[in-house]
Amino acid sequence: MTAPHTLQAPIRADKLARMKPEKIIVASPSAANATPMMAQYWEIKSQYPDCLLFYRMGDFFELFFADAEIASAALNIHLTKRGKHSGEDIPMCGVPVVRAEDYLHKLIAQGHRVAVCEQLENPAEAKKRGGKSVVQRGVVRLVTPGTITEDGLLDVRASNFLTAAYCEPGVGFAHASLDISTGEFLIGSGAEQSAPGEFARLAPSEILLSDEDGETGKAAAQAGFGETAQTPLPRAYFSAMAGEAAMKSALGVGHLDAFGTFSKGELAAAGALLKYVEITQMGKIPAIRPPKKAEAAATMSIDAATRANLEMTRSASGAKGGSLLEAVDRTLTAAGTRELAQRLSAPLIDPAHITARLDAVAAFVERGALRDQIRTSLKRSPDIARALSRLKLGRGGPRDLGLMRDGLTTARDLHGGLASLATQFLDNAPPSEIASIQQRLASASGAASRALGEALADDLPILLRDGGCVRVGFRADLDEARRLSQDGRSVIAGLQMKYVEQTGVKTLKVRHNNVLGYFIETPTSAARALGQPPHDALFQHRQTVSNAMRFATADLTQIEARMAIAAETALVIEAEVFEALASAILAEERELGDLAQALGELDCICALAALAEEQGYARPLVDASCAFHIEGGRHPVVEQALRRARGPAFIGNDCQLGANARLWILTGPNMAGKSTYLRQNAVIAILAQMGSFVPAKAAHIGVLDKLFSRVGASDDLARGRSTFMVEMVETAAILHQATERSLVILDEIGRGTATFDGLSIAWGCLEYLHDVNRCRALFATHYHELTSLPGRLAAAANATMAVKEWKDDIVFLHQVKPGAADRSYGVQVAKLAGLPTAVVDRARVLLTELEARAGRNAPAEALPLFAAAKTAAPETRPNPVADAVAAINPDELTPREALDALYRLKALDAL
């Protein structure tokens, strides 16, 4: 797979902006040495130099020259040649139109952009202009990672954001993000250092940057999106004035006041985003929902490193499996999964809003039967948002109308279910979140819903040109055209029987293909009879193929003409009905967008309720205090993994961070569960503030404004950073940004350097967290010396992972208890890991000696590792050499006696 590339001059956006979307290119008279077809190809390709050109030729999209070489390698398809240009073979490869989506998916995944060039007329129409006329072609869309809408190219259960980023030095960072496939539109801003976190939260598939802005590109790389498609645009596109006008036009309003107040940077980003969408969609505007303000101050700040450490939406391997999202996902619809992922990625910090979400979840936890009924209906709910977007962009088909019909039917059923829920509250006031959903679902009773039900057939074709999308009985003229077409087929069947009787050729068949239309075919051995009197006047020879000959008759041609007229008439009528239905749908675009959002929210809420009941989660108390009290907390991913493997039950643990002990120093051996304990408390905070029940017996959490996690590290070879450098960079970011309302979890700070250096750094970090940041923090370490700090730092406390020794082995109890560990148990862990017995035995001997020397020669504060618990002094063995040396008095020895003594010592040493 080739690495995704960044375009230096993307798609000639300035030229495209001046092009009319309906522009048709026939040929370029300047290409005098090229065939008419290749001249047309070069003319179109010159407008899109940075895209692979999918050039439609009949049933194939073909690529030529360098595009063919790139595509053949990327798609692993055969590279061939087609004619010559300037005396050289023209490289060529192609893909079938019916499988184009599969190949587009592969190209887009590798970072390529594709210009789709379609035939805009039939070959027959081209022939009317002359024998050498070329079929008119034109680019109908540009396919880039952030502008795809087809389900076959998208992960239907994840958002696909196109993000325009604008950074004004000294002012801040702003972004505008649009999921073209659903119409979700987000606008936000913040300090410059918030850019990596925003990129990590949005996970855009394509980032639009000013061609003069290198800092935002660096922020994307820091967030882990360095290989995401980054498209530089002219600086002029980032205009606040143009952005305001573009938003008004896209939303169909005269003022933006109803949607909030937008900064100049936000308007500039929105302007560039909408301009790029206009260019890539050839002037068509997708269904865009009213913009949501994605204020950094309204959600918990979680930087890119923390998201990766906690494996929030992707595991360490990059897959959804094994992530927190996968563990808590019980949604039944694509829209519900997208809503869940967005809530998880952006936990709230307003206690009132969090409580409203928790009230909605609690309502369905307490009403399991109604929840199950609603979830049964939700299983039938299609992806309305993406169907609506395809219809708005002119890419929709009959099945998209069918999705709208089925979705509206489901919405009506769900509206009734929520109405019954409202009657179950004594004050007749269901939770505000549910009331809002119910109100938006009411739009399902509109005229569009009735029209779709009356007009659409039950079984719908994929393409409109296949016919059969309109219900029988809906239009009398359509039914008549269909009858004539069907009658023609009956007449042809009768004509075949007639010709068999007339000629006596029982193998005679009437067949059809797209080139000849209807024709009569007989084996070559029987064809002679049709070419001799009296049949030669009736049958006209049309074609000879292998083992068969084909003929036509005047009757067959006449019947075919009548059928073609009837079939064409039927297709025209169906197209009229389709356009009318699509227009009716788009007339209610805003309401249907709200309906799609409501269905996603309802699925998300019901899924969280089902999760809480299934896993035994508790409702947390979230308020404005600085409490962090968790009783019996568990890690949802690890707990479920143990259950699937039928392993031991997960051991729950408490965490009590407060005014008297807001900083815990956690010690204990490796493999005892320190990292899991750290992560589970951060995960519980995220779940609580996104509005979910949590894996604990009880939880009281004062809202966190920021969450930082540095658990584990790896090299960043691309930027020349060692493991220790990555660790220090992440730690520095935490110390600079954490506030009194933040939660910080740190694991093994300082382990990547020399012992005393690491100990000093860890010590300094702890003091800074305690005295300056004053945040709630969990600090895991192997430096035993740090356990003395609670005596010096008023709000610090020790905690340790409990273990039990048994016959020179250890048993991990996975329990957190007050106090400090007395040793690291590293040798025992090494034994469990399977190190050779000789290595383990030698390590024990060396450990005993090192601990003894450290005890005699160094103060306790300088010990590099855990000191062993004080025991009796190690047993000393007799040393003959040392005794002999002690018995010698050098002042009394003659030279000869001294030499003899030296030989005796040498002999003793040899023993």
Image (cartoon, rainbow, N blue to C red):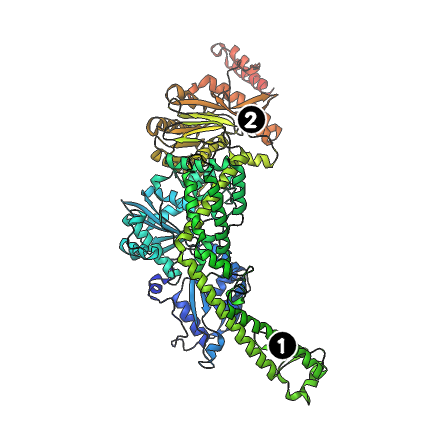
Where residue 462 appears, as percent x and y from the top left, is 53, 62
Say few, some or many: other residues with alpha carbon within 10 Å of mark 1 (under 14 / 14 to 19 / 20 or more).
Answer: few
Seen from the viewer's position, the closer of residues 637 and 901 is: 637
Residue 827 badge: 2
Q: The residue tagged with tag 2: helix, strand or loop? A: helix
Q: Image height check: is 275 above or below 310?
A: below
User: Which residue extends farthest bottom?
Assistant: 533
Where residue 435 appears, as percent x and y from the top left, is 42, 42
Indicate which label's residue lies in the foreground, 1 or 2.
1
Label 1 sits on residue: 491
As shown in the figure, which amino acid type bears the numbered disc 1?
Val
Seen from the viewer's position, the closer of residues 709 and 487 is: 487
Where residue 706 appears, as percent x and y from the top left, is 38, 35
Q: The residue tagged with tag 1: helix, strand or loop? A: helix
Work out whether residue 674 can be spotted: yes
Q: Image height check: is 436 above or below 678?
A: below
Residue 33 badge: none
As shown in the figure, which amino acid type bears the numbered disc 2?
Val
Query: In the shown orientation, is residue 271 left or right of residue 152?
Result: left
Quarter in which the C terminus is drawn: top right
